[in-house]
Image (cartoon, rainbow, N blue to C red):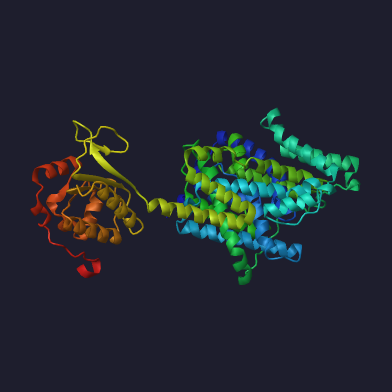
Amino acid sequence: MDLKKYIPSLQWLPYYNQTQLKGDLSAGITVGIMLIPQGMAYAMLAGLEPIHGLYAVTVPLVIYALFGSSRQLAVGPVAMVSLLTAAGISSLGPDSPEAYLLYALTLAFLVGAIQFFMGALRLGFVVNFLSHPVINGFTSAAAIIIGLSQVKHLLNISLPNSEHVQEMVVAIGQHIGDIHWLTFGLGVLGILIIKFGKKIHPALPAPLLAVALGILLVWGFGLTDKGVKIVGDVPGGLPALSFPSFDMSTWSTLLPIALTISLVGFAESFAVAKTIQAKHKNYRLDANQELVALGLSNFGAAFFSGYPVTGGFSRTAVNNQAGAKTTLASVISAGLILLTLLFFTGLFYYLPSAILAAVVLVAVAGLIDFKEPVNLWYKDKADFAMLIATFLITLTMGIETGIIMGMILSLLVVIYRASRPHMAQLGRVPGTKIYRNIRRFKDLEINKNLLIVRIDGPIYFANVEYIRDKMDLWLSERKNQTKMIIFNMESITSIDSTGAHALYEWIQTWRSDKIDVCITGTKGPIRDVLDKWKLIECIGADHMFMDDYSATAFFEQTLDTKSQEKYAPYALQSNAEKK
């Protein structure tokens, strides 16, 4: 057994050198500093105490470093998964912080189990059902919901927990007069520092600078006495061993949101990992191994007081830009967090909640994509409609419903397109043996007695009626002038049993109407199918040609009425009948 296949870190570890260490050390420290405020902010977004965000970026990072196939992906809490976590747990109505944490641990365990077994069963392709427009619409809507959920911390007003934008907007409107302006000022200051700090210098840890300034302002001016809410006591020490719930009723309630987090988290993680890997040609990315690694990382979160994690866009980009060469950078980041947990958690007592809200708001603002809908409007109306539908459903009906409906829309579009394959009537380019689509090329040679048709795609149960209707339409347009149909099969990828039966019926019907049929350009696998179902025998071996030109020559030279009576009907045989 090749351990390197299952533990990708063994591929680079034996050849590790000092040059790689320099880049990993720089990236590890940079991302570690970034993770401190992000982890705390995202935990708060998930409805947990900030310390659990720090726990979630310790053991999971080390586990991914061992088993992940990406060498730059930075794993940890992200805004999307944090909000999904809060949405899923709120449906259970936990009656205490302890119960809430137990549900978060259980959710991490379920996400880990789903991702691990998907990877083990080689199901990484499932994420392909989340098309780009669906992910784009879902992400933009979720970013707006996440942003609105932080308004209560930014303005220090009381708002109900909801993931429906209409309810959130109404609630904000009702409490707009209760704004605590000092808290709002701190939040705006944090947003400005985080947003524009990078413009001063790319290496500047702007979120940490905002955190430090917020703490100093609250402590120095006694702002807690003036109504500014702070994080308060942050327990120190290493993450304690924890256990999820194994109650089946809890599992059944959390399973839909766990499945959503598994797919959305993997889609986000793999998308950014693939983008970064394109810049590094010294390793290969494995979708199934990524699922296994993320699954194990979530197990680590479940058993060490964290909550669901995945790869993050911003952290991974920073990790790569800071020079990360291997996943040792993640181990260094985890080490920095552990030092913080051991010695520096007391420094966060006066951290204002508005600053953590600012961290989240700046992060999710970059997830709202305005360009892609405009681009799709001009280039692909169907994908534009799918994006807008997913966006509106997510905004108004909730994140879980949005992603599920998005997947259903993706599948419906796939089915619709597969059921309507592209079909073309062909004509000959004058003076050549080349045939082209008569709708796209002018001045082609077209014989009114000859219908040459090319089908681009499979012939199977979902599209046989569409193909037959199209053929009937074309035949009727020719006003019974057609004497022969030439089926160009060079673009046909497969034929199932329904397609074989339909093709047999078409041939018999057309020949009974005195229209002969030829087939051209079949690939080996398609010819095997035709032979298996006795269709070559039905149509006649002398009516099978390599190309359209040969079939056209046959039509012009040998067509007569007897050729249509030459072939007696052949009953199609199933495999069972043959045996």
Q: Position of residue 523 (x, y in %)?
A: 24, 48
Residue 262 visible in the current orientation: no
Taking the image as shown, residue 558 lies to the left or right of residue 31, namely left
Residue 421 visible in the current orientation: yes
Q: Residue furthest top?
A: 200
Residue 265 to residue 213: above or below: below
Choose between 5 and 290: the one closer to the eye. 290
Counting every numbered tag in the picture gives 0
Residue 403 to residue 439: above or below: below
Choose between 157 and 553: the one closer to the eye. 553
Choose between 516 and 258: the one closer to the eye. 516
Q: Quadrant of the C terminus?
A: bottom left
Please tell me which residue is depicted at 84% across the width and 39% down the height of the picture. 216
**In the figure, residue 239 lies in which quadrant?**
bottom right
Q: Position of residue 392 (x, y in %)?
A: 60, 50
Q: Position of residue 446 (x, y in %)?
A: 21, 38
